[in-house]
Amino acid sequence: MTTRESYRILGINSRAEMAEVRRRFRILAQKYHPDLNPNNPEAASQFRRVVEAYEKVQAHLARTPRSEKRYYRSSRRAAKKEFFEEVLGMDPGEESPTHAMGPDFRYDFRIPFVDALVGLSTTIVVPHLAPCDCCAGSGRVPVAQPQPCPDCQGKGCLVKGPGLFRGGPNCRRCRGNGLIQEQPCPACEGKGYHQQFRPYHLDIPAGTEDGARLRFVGQGGESHQGGPPGNLEVVISVAPHEFFTRKGRDLHCQFKVSFAQAALGGEVQVPTLRGYATLNLPRGTRSGCLFCFPAAGAPGGGNHPPGDQIVEVVVTTPENLTLAQQQIMEEMARLGKSEINRAAHE
């Protein structure tokens, strides 16, 4: 990964200062953290890229001469002041800084098929990453007494070898200062955040479909730029049912009847969403025939009417016949053959 690509991944300019780099890293780390995206391998991959990009940019800033940094900051402030005073006719202090919103969170919630149709009132518990109060989300705290860096022995750069010119690249641990002035925050172990769990009450309306979304404004990730927090979005996943299949507001099902029931006809009891309904089979019902229970499907909601229940009859063929059943079937086959022969001679 190149330095230019690292800046692009973090979404910052190559002249951004370390404070801005840290802010962007915390925002992206919360957005793609694996704990908040348990079923999203792409988020875990992106999280690793963000961490790698952050380390790359840190190393690049550590190698930038301090005089160059000071010149850039002073020249940028001068250009900004000139622009506001001469072009806009206003003082820079009147500028209203933009505060980026915190990251949005997604929570996948799976519910049973019937609960989605009849409605459900429940409570979920969602994990959150809250900035550490001890280190203000930076993951680092100042030490009481700065100590020489153990990696470079206080020199600020890594020694390459013997000779007069032995200076190597700036030490990454102390960033070229030669002193350790910060240490990992003991409260959050250097992570910059704590994991918290917040309860949320859900009122899932009757007739909710798979993929429905419930939005909680301001309940997402915290902003590290003084802006408002992001939003929490709960995505509803509906589990399949062993008997019903939903198509829009209609419920489809297959109901098995015996060969005798189909041939003789009569009343059968078919399961519905609200119990059982009587289906009057006509004589000679064939497998695949469709019957309808009006308004026995999913609730419509609002001004929409409920759907229907579509029943497909499946005629089953007996496998293990008793002697009496076999004799009856043979007699039926003989009678059927006689009917065919008589029709052919007429």
Image: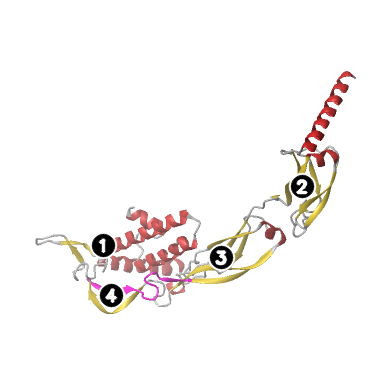
Q: Quadrant of the C terminus?
A: top right
Q: Amino acid at mark 1?
A: Arg
- Going by the image, does 262 lie left or right of 58? right
The range drawn in magenta is 178-195
- Residue extending furthest front? 323
- The residue indicated by pointer 1 is 63
- Residue extending furthest bottom? 144
What is the spatial separation of the Cα atoms under label 1 and label 3, in whole angstroms? Answer: 40 Å
Q: Is residue 324 above or below residue 194?
A: above
Query: Which numbered circle lies on residue 310?
Result: 2
- First in sequence, mark 3 or 4: give its number: 4
Q: Where's residue 345, x and y in %?
A: 88, 18
Q: Residue at x 42, y 55 (%)?
A: 45
The local crowd at label 4, few if under 14, some if 14 to 19, many if 20 or more residues have their Cα within 10 Å, is some
Q: Where's residue 68, x and y in %?
A: 27, 64
- First in sequence, mark 2 or 4: give its number: 4
- First in sequence, mark 1 or 4: give its number: 1
Q: Nearer the viewer, mark 1 or mark 4?
A: 4
Q: Amino acid at mark 3?
A: Leu
- The residue indicated by pointer 4 is 181
What is the spatial separation of the Cα atoms under label 3 and label 4, in whole angstroms? Answer: 38 Å
Q: Secondary structure at mark 3?
A: strand
- Going by the image, does 179 lie left or right of 86? left
Q: Secondary structure at mark 4?
A: strand
Q: Amino acid at mark 4?
A: Gln
The local crowd at label 3, few if under 14, some if 14 to 19, many if 20 or more residues have their Cα within 10 Å, is many
Residues at marks 2 and 1 touching, judged by CB atoms closer than 8 Å: no
Residues at marks 1 and 4 touching, judged by CB atoms closer than 8 Å: no
